[in-house]
Image (tube, coloured by chain):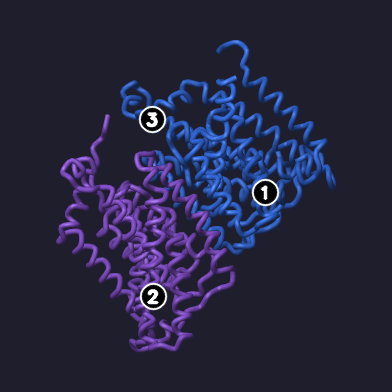
Chain colours: A blue, B purple
Amino acid sequence: MMGTDKTLTVLGATLLALVAAGFLLPDWAVFLLTLSLARGLVVLGLLILWRSGLVSFGQALFFGTGAYTVGLLVLFAGLRDIVALTVLAALAAGLLAWLVGLLLTGYRDIFFAMLSMAFSMILYGILVKTELLGSTDGFNVPHPTFLGYAPAGEKMRVSIYLWTALVSMAAAYGVHRHLSSTMGQLGAAIRDNEIRVEYLGASVRRVLLIQVIIAGALAGAGGAVTAFAVGHIDPDAMAYWTVSGEFVFVTILSGTGHILAPFLGSLLFELIRSFAFQYSPYTWQMVLGTSLLLIILFLPNGLWSLYARLRKGG
Amino acid sequence: MLTFVAILVDGLIYSSWLFVVAVGLTLIFGVMKILNVAHGSLYAFGAYASASLIGAYFNAGWAPLGSFAVILLAALIIGVALGLLMERGLLRFMYGRDEVIIVLVTYAVFLILEDVIILIWGTSPYFAYQPYSLLGTASFGVLTFSNYDLALIGLSVFIGGLLWWGLTATRQGKMLQAVIHDREMALAFGIDVTRMFTITFVIGAVLGALGGAVTAPQISVTPGIGVEVIVIAFAVVVVGGMGSIPGAAVGALIVGMIRATAVHLIPQVELFVIYAVMSLVLAFRPKGLFSRAEARKI
């Protein structure tokens, strides 16, 4: 496995394809891709946790923290640079994940899931009651600048998209490195049997805490770029528990077989959502629920397992 | 002093509502180890069915007091029908799979049912205030409470008592306790665990629907009422210890009282104080207040 890292090549090629797509595709498609990549960032974090046997039903906590960090810094500190803001949002979410993680990592299975959901509802409750941040209406996020460059009109959308693509692929590479490290490899062992991992001399809680922090920071970055892409943030779209539910849904949809799977899954999710909204707005959740059931029943390892199966057969 | 009484009574009313809503969830978890996210849909279905039936009942012009029987009937119909459909039609194929996967299955059912509700009842609100105004109000000095709300306290005590009696004093209940303690051993002693599961799920579903059915006269029934109920019911159940019925009662009391206090004294924190309490309890008692220790399995 040493020597040439195939994943790096794949990620580089994907980034090139994404950049090309940004210039070739129509406006709405670029917007859709931006949202998919941002959501993919969050799901990438869930993938790490999933591999260690944890499912967080409260990732909107960090997603919302990222988005609101951006909003606050833009509104009250006058910061406009997208690079600095994305990094700061990821840091803020990571810091929060560290604090929350100290408590969360004592739990497993549904307790982990439900406790993380409870924490995200605390944030939601605070945001809804904070007049300063527009309560349930939220507020608009002005356009960012890119290291001093301030694009106008259509170029703005493409610039945000390119930045999102770069962040996503860089994050994917980082997660790939983490998963191939000793600590990342311990995840599967923890999933199988924690006590044996402890007997081997590794600290389960430390590994999980670091993974919760990574997942939190990724969700924060995802929230930050979403805030810029949409240009608006509000508690219902950023911090409600149903948002976390959608993240978990995409995780199941994608499967955890490859670090690119979350991005593909998110893209499919956004596509289904756009079309469902357009053609039958009142059955959107039904479409979502039915596909979730079908995937759990017939494709328990997600969409990526289709590819793996094809390659094995061919 | 006045505020104190108001907090106490409001807290009791809210606690009883919480108990009715949460007890079905904890019962199902205790017996089947299934965390039923679709409990919120059962609540919403119960509320809609109750509102429609009450409307039809009053249009027919029968004796107004009979509308309380209609509420119970709505809960029974919805709970039995949906409960059987979910357990027999879907969940039984999932037994033995990861608990988290089953949570996701019930989450999928919840999503589907949310839209089924809209397809059946549309998006405009339903009102069924008649039973609520029928009972009038009671005054304690300057404070006025609705008798309907106060009756809810009685209902929750009755339900709690009934469940407790059923579990500890009847043959079926004792068999159920055996299943709760050790599923395999119960099976080995000849208890029909599959049947127990179905019965438990239906009872839990009826309780969920009942929660919605008795709430319908107090609110305007609109799409999305089930979403909030799920998280709040989870909070109650987790505070008390998942799967414990006395736990659900204590959890409901704690959460209800604290929320009532917050509403009267610091309304800004009303929404999140529940979850803050839940996190605090879990920080000290990781499995809730009423939970049995579990052996570590190597």
Indicate the amino acid at tag 1.
Ala
The residues bearing labels 1 and 2 have C-alpha atoms spaced at a distance of: 45 Å
- Where residue B246 appears, as percent x and y from the top left, is 25, 60
Q: Point out the residue furthest to the top here.
A: A3
- Where residue B272 appears, as percent x and y from the top left, is 46, 59
| Mark seen at residue A78 | none
Foreground tag (3 vs 2)? 2
Q: Is residue A4 left or right of residue A289?
A: right
How would you rate the neighbour count of disc 3 (Cα within 10 Å): few for under 14, some for 14-19, many for 20 or more? Answer: many
- Where residue A295 appears, as percent x and y from the top left, is 52, 40
Give whichever of B6, A240 is nearer the camera.
A240
Q: In which image quadrant can residue A172 be found?
A: top right
Q: Is residue A250 left or right of residue B10?
A: right
- Residue found 35% across the figure and 64% down from its top: B206
Give whichever of B260, A88 is nearer the camera.
B260
Quadrant position of the C terminus of chain A in the picture: top right
Q: Are marks 3 and 2 on the same chain?
A: no
Q: In which image quadrant can residue B159 be found?
A: bottom left
Q: What's the chain of the residue with tag 1?
A: A
B146, above or below A12, in the image = below
What residue is pinned by disc 3? A204
What residue is pinned by disc 1? A227
- Which secondary structure, mark 1? helix
- Where residue A139 appears, as percent x and y from the top left, is 67, 58
